[in-house]
Image: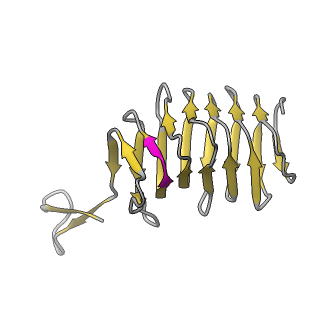
Amino acid sequence: VGGTGTAVVSFCPTSNISIQNFSITNDFPAITCRNLTIGAGGAWNDANSLTLTGNLSNSGTYNGLTGNSITFSGTNAQTLTGAGAINVYNMTCSNAAGVTISATSGGVSAKNIVNVTTGTLNTNGKLTLASNATSTGMIAALLGGASVNGNVTLNRRHVVQYIPGLSPSNSKQLVHMI
């Protein structure tokens, strides 16, 4: 898909999806495809379920909105590549051959659960578990030989509170992590 503007996806392709200079909003409950390619200027906005049996190449933006789930379930090793932002809500790696984040910048930011059910998730230092007021990024329990290899960044939400009765300018801050 190419051009300018916004499109709403309401079909279920079983082959490749390629987005160039276009913003796509997925309103289909579940899409399965081989490869997803997002070119520079392209965006995939998804509050639903996307299953990839191939690779994710992203030079634009992947926005996994609240409730979104992206699953990597190929039979060959899968990769996430490109310089674009990959923001997911839930991510599942269910591939015995493994999933590798090879993004040249940014990498993957997960706001809820990263679940590795089979195989190895290779992060290459490009996985961030992010938190905000409504969600906390985390890795689910690793069972049955599943593993995560590489550094993971924890980005936790901080709450700043001031001692009651004093103005913020002369009060000591109480900072704690949620």
The quarter holding residue 7 reads top right
Q: Could you say where residue 126 lies in the image, as x and y percent from the top left?
A: 42, 36
Q: Furthest-bottom residue in view?
A: 164
Quick one: which residue is furthest to the right in this view? Answer: 11
Tell me if residue 28 comes above or below residue 44 in the rendering. Answer: below
Above or below — where is 132 with respect to 14?
below
Question: Residue 3's x, y, as percent?
Answer: 84, 29
Q: Main secondary structure of the magenta part?
A: strand
Please name the residue shown 36% across and 41% down the image.
Answer: 149
Depth check, front residue: 24 or 169: 24
Question: Would you say 37 lies left or right of 116 here?
Answer: right
Where's the N terminus, which quadrant?
top right
Q: What residue do we see at 86% from left, 54% from top? A: 10
**Number of marks in the image?**
0
On the image, the x and y values in percent for residue 19 come to 76, 33
Q: Position of residue 49 (x, y in %)?
A: 68, 57
- Stretch in magenta: 117-121
Front position in the image: 159 or 142:
142
Q: Is residue 66 left or right of residue 150?
A: right
Colour style of the rendered protein structure? secondary structure
Identify the image quadrant of residue 59. Answer: top right
Q: Residue at x 68, y 43 (%)?
A: 53
Q: Quadrant of the C terminus?
A: bottom left
Residue 158 belongs to the span the image colors magenta:
no
| 143 to 165, vertically: above or below | above
| 120 part of magenta stretch | yes
Q: Residue at x 39, y 49 (%)?
A: 147
Residue 33 higher or lower than 92, as above or below = above
